[in-house]
Image (cartoon, rainbow, N blue to C red):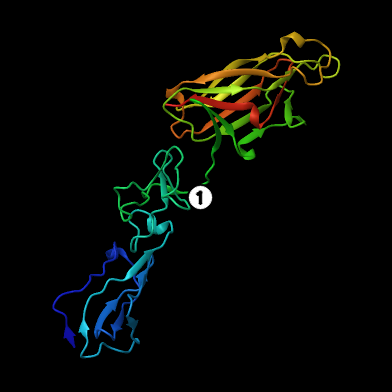
Amino acid sequence: MKYASSAVFVFLLAGLAFAAPLPTLIIVNNTSMECARFLPGDECMDCSLPDGWEILDASASCPDDYAVVNVRSNCIGFEIQRCCTEKHSGASGDCRNMVRNDLTKECAFVTSATNYTAPTGWIKMPGNVSSREWVCPLDYAWTTFTASTSAISQYGHVNVAYVLDDSDFKVGSGKEIDGWTWLTQPGQSATWTFYDMPTDRNLYIYIAPLVTSPFGNGGGSGYSTNVTITYENSTGSTDTTVSLENTHPEFKMPYDTMGWGYQTFSYLTIPADEVPLDGRLNITLTKLSNGEHVAVNKECCSIEYISE
């Protein structure tokens, strides 16, 4: 058996010292008359033979007239949580599609991190970091990443965000009429959840519910009223009483206007230093003990902000 004076290639597995590898095999290249030892992988990596090489039977040995060399295998890491967690056993997994949130101490996989725009608080593998270094810290939890987002329309430098998914609008008990849910009892509420809001500027909650008085003939006409708006901030939550101003005060009367003139509006400023660091905002409207009834839907609350 001949030994080559210099190695052709070196086969390395990252983290091999901690691996639980498969048994090494003897492979041969009958064209070049060479032999090599081949590691087919371990619990976090699968390796395939180089072109022109084949595996010998377990009982076979390298022919005496073949040179023994080192070869480089084609290895692919597994995209699984354990193989992308700090200090795991085994070789390096395929962690290129892992994203990490250092605020919530969570890790997750996405479909394609290269073409992925990470939500606020989540980061993907930086360009100056190798895939071997990009792992989830031991004290982080793995989660299934859901790409919840908000619908954002732009009007020049003004951005208006709306709730996109029905699941991000939650309303308690109330009577639904024509897509609006009427809050008629004190304490009834509705909550809108917004995602990916900027954290470096003021945000403005704009609300436009319907309001009427139940004491007229039929449904009465439009009225103004007060409600409580609660939003989560960077340190807790803020409760503010706001006035919903009727947009048609000329039609305030005890007679039923069949919904015309019920529209109201109000807005509330969230200072930049109160915006949650993960860009997620929960906005809750709660009916007070006043007599007017308030109707809400998914579209009647929005977040507005100015572009940089």
Please identify the quarter of the rendering in which residue 104 is found.
Answer: top left
Question: Which element carries disc 1, helix, strand or loop?
Answer: loop
Q: Most extreme residue toward the left, as rendered? A: 5
Residue 85 position in % (x across, y down): 37, 54
Q: Quadrant of residue 244?
A: top right
Residue 247, image quadrant: top right
- Left or right of 296 in this view: 49: left
Q: Is residue 11 above or below residue 294?
A: below
Of 283 and 177, the residue lying toward us: 177
Quarter the N terminus occupies: bottom left
Q: Which residue is mark 1?
A: 144
**Most distant residue in the bottom direction:** 64
Residue at figure coordinates x 43%, y 59% from the top left: 79
Quadrant of the image containing the C terminus: top left
Q: Nearer the viewer, residue 140 or 208?
A: 208
Spot occupied by residue 59 in the image (x, y as percentages of width and height): 33, 89
Q: Give coordinates of residue 199: x percent, y percent.
A: 43, 29
**As drawn, 193 above or below 81:** above
Type of amino acid at the residue the image marks with label 1: Thr
- Give me the residue at 72% from left, 10% from top: 249
Left or right placement of residue 33 versus residue 149 in this view: left
